Image (cartoon, grey):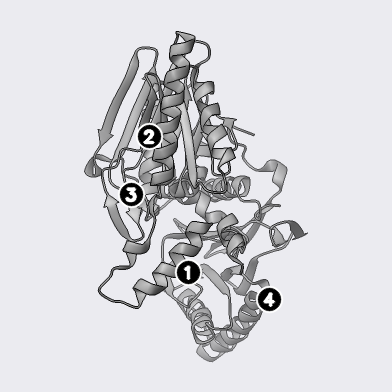
Amino acid sequence: MCLWCLSESTTAFLPFQTTILAVKFNGGVIIGSDSRASMGGSYVSSKTINKLIQVHDRIFCCIAGSLADAQAVTKMAKFQLSFHSIQMESPPLVKAAASVMKELCYSNKEELQAGFITAGWDRKKGPQVYTVSLGGMLLSQPFTIGGSGSTYIYGYVDAKYKPDMSREECLQFATNALALAIGRDNVSGGVVHLVVITEDGVEHVVIPGDKLPKFHDE
Amino acid sequence: MAAVSAMGFSQHLSSCNDLVPEWTSREVSTGTTIMAVEYDGGVVMGADSRTTTGAYIANRVTDKLTPIHDRIFCCRSGSAADTQAIADAVTYQLGFHSIELDEPPLVQTAANLFKDMCYRYREELMAGIIVAGWDKRRGGQVYTVPVGGMLSRQPVSVGGSGSTYIYGYVDSNYRTGMSKEECLRFTAGALSLAMERDGSSGGVVRLAVINEQGVERQVILGNQLPKFSTV
C-alpha cells in the first residue's frame, strides 16, 4: 500500500463493514445487525442482506468480515452441529456452537478474515453470548458489539447496559444502539434485523429504516 | 507525510537495537478525547489529560484546554507540537486584532483564524481543534476545525481518537436547552466513557465553563469520575 494512502486515510481498508450485537436479558438473548453490504465504502451492493445465520434451533450467529469466509464457516458449523446433536441425542450447547466456530477460525487463521458473535439458549446454562474474534479467541460476555459501526456505540452501550433487563427493555436497547451506529457509520445501514431467542422459541423482528428511533439532530 | 516516512525509517534503525525503546522514534501526540457543548449563556469544554509518545505516556496531567483570549478557549487533539504552534500563532493574531478593534474578539473570528492556518498548511499539519467561547454578539458558540481544515459550527462537538467511541452516547443524550450543570455532567460522563475504551485517552478530566461572567475551571480526578455499570 503506498505511503500517501496510509496517511490520507487510515480507513482506506475497512475490514468489518457492518454493525452487529448480541445482548443477554432475563430469560433470553437478542442478536441483531444492520442489513447493508458494501464494496469499498462507496457502493452498497445490498440493502437487505441478512447477517443473522441460524446454526441450530436456538443458536444464531452473526458475521462480520469477509462474507465469503463467513458463509463458508457457518455452513461448516451448521453441518458439524447437526451431526453433533444427533450423536448426543439432544440440542447442542451454545458453547459447543461457539467452540466449533472458534476451532475453524483458529485453525485457519491465516486464510480466514471473519469474526463471529454466537448467541442462543440451551437447557444447561440458559441464555448466553459468545464472541469469536478474528484470530480465534473465544470469550463469553453478557453483551457484545462488533463490526465497524460498533466503535461509535461503545460509550452508549457501556452507559446504558444493565444486567437482567426485561425483553422490552432489551429490544429498545438493541434497537437504539444499532440506530445510533447506523447514524454514524456509512457502511452500516438499511433495516435493523433482531432475533429474540428464548426457551420458547425464536422470533425475528425487522425494523425498517424509517421506523428507527430518531435522535436530536435528525 | 514526510513525518510518516521518517518515522518508519528511524523505527527500523532503532528496532534493531534493544537498548533503545520503541517510543523514542515516535511522534508526541495528544491522542485524546475532547468535547465542547453550547448551552444558553455559554459553553462547557472538556478534555482528558493523556499525551502519548507511542506506548509511553509522556504527560498524564496535560492541559489540553488552551486559552486563546479572555473568553475563548480551544481544545487540542492530534500532534502536540502542531497544535501548540497553531494555538500560539492564533493567540498572537487574535490579541493584535482585538487591540485594533478595541473590543473583545468574536469566537467566529478565532475559529476562522484556526481554519485559515489549518487549511493552508493541511499537508504538513496533523491537528484537530475545537474552538469554543462566549462573545456578546452570539453568546456561547462551539466551532470545530478537524484535520484538513474544515470549519463548522455545531451545538456539540467531540474530537480526538477517543471520540469515535462516544458518538452514540452523545447523539442519544444531547438535548437542546440543557442547563450548565446538565452540560457538565453530560461532558464528564462522555469523557469517562471514552477514556475507559480508548488507550490513548486517560488521566483526569479537565472541564472549563465559559460565559459572560468569565471562565471557571475544574478537574475531576480518576477515582471521582462517573462510573457506569459494565459487568
Task: Look at label 2 and name its amino acid.
Answer: Gly
Between marks 1 and 4, how big is the CA–CA gap?
19 Å
Q: Which residue is mark 4?
A: A68
Q: Position of residue A49 (x, y in %)?
A: 72, 62
Work out which residue is located at the far top of the displayed protein and give it: B102
Q: Is residue B103 above or below residue A63?
A: above
Q: Quadrant of the N terminus of chain A?
A: bottom right
Task: Look at label 4 and name its amino acid.
Answer: Ala
Task: Look at label 3 and name its amino acid.
Answer: Thr
Is disc 3 in the same subunit as disc 2? yes
Question: Could you tell me which chain the residue with mark 1 belongs to?
Answer: A
Q: Determine the secondary structure under disc 3.
A: strand
**A60 vs A75, nearest the viewer:** A75
Query: Mark 3 near mark 2, Cβ–Cβ under 8 Å?
Result: no
- Residue B178 visible, this angle: no
Q: Which residue is mark 2?
A: B46
Q: Which residue is mark 1?
A: A131
Query: Mark 1 near mark 3, Cβ–Cβ under 8 Å?
Result: no
Between marks 2 and 4, how big is the CA–CA gap?
44 Å
Q: Which residue is mark 3?
A: B51
